[in-house]
Image (spheres, rainbow, N blue to C red):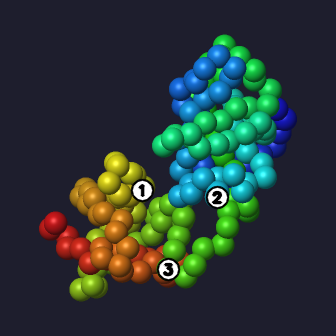
Amino acid sequence: MKKNSSIDKSLFVLIAKIGKTRGLKGEFFLRSFAEKLETLTSFKKFFSLQPCTMEEIFFEYIKKSNNNIIAKLKSIDDIEGIKSFGQKDIYVLKSELPELEKNEAYWFELEKMQVLNLEGQHLGNVDRVDNFGANDVLKVQKKNKTLLIPFIKNRVIISINKKENSILVDWQEDY
């Protein structure tokens, strides 16, 4: 593991989270926030947030096993080592993210975007994006009101305009 104490956290994006241990040799379940395993494994560098630093971590492997992702860090070879490492978040550099198609955005890009409906009403701004199982959900805030809008492309989410920092939705304020 390699430490770098002069890293700006805004240069990183959360890509995965270390889960429960698996076996006795330092393996663990990895919860990926990437859409595909191939995307996750395409990154060159991974980092873990430590107190006051962003520490580079090195995977021995990341692989699919049934419906799970199993991983192992190069420097940890036993269950106690991975337990002490804890349930850490795993980050990658934003600069390594693949380019997206038009009308697509990463979650972190959606935050703070204004949300407009087909009638031109301003519904609020995206506070955050969550996933509760079925699909992603935009949490939209406008003053003291919160709207939860399902992120279903071409049905609820009509378009995403990064230049205008806006999302067009087929949704009403009173839903």
Question: Which residue was labeled with disc 1?
Answer: 129
Cα–Cα gap, marks 2 and 3: 19 Å
Find numbered disc 1 in the image and state the secondary structure of the residue it sits on.
strand
Q: Secondary structure at mark 2?
A: helix
Residue under circle 3?
Answer: 103
- Badge 3 marks a residue whose secondary structure is loop
* Distance of label 3 from label 1 (alpha carbons): 17 Å
Q: Amino acid at mark 2?
A: Thr
Marker disc for residue 39: 2
Foreground pick, 159 / 72 = 72
Instruction: Check the image and name the residue furthest to the left.
Output: 174
Q: Is residue 107 left or right of residue 127?
A: right
Residue 120 is at least partly visible in this image? yes
Residue furthest front as drawn = 66
Query: How far across and down, in percent of the image, does residue 112 sit?
Result: 46, 64
In the displayed structure, would residue 136 be above or below residue 90? below
* Sequence-first tag of 1 and 2: 2
Is residue 5 in view from this perspective? no
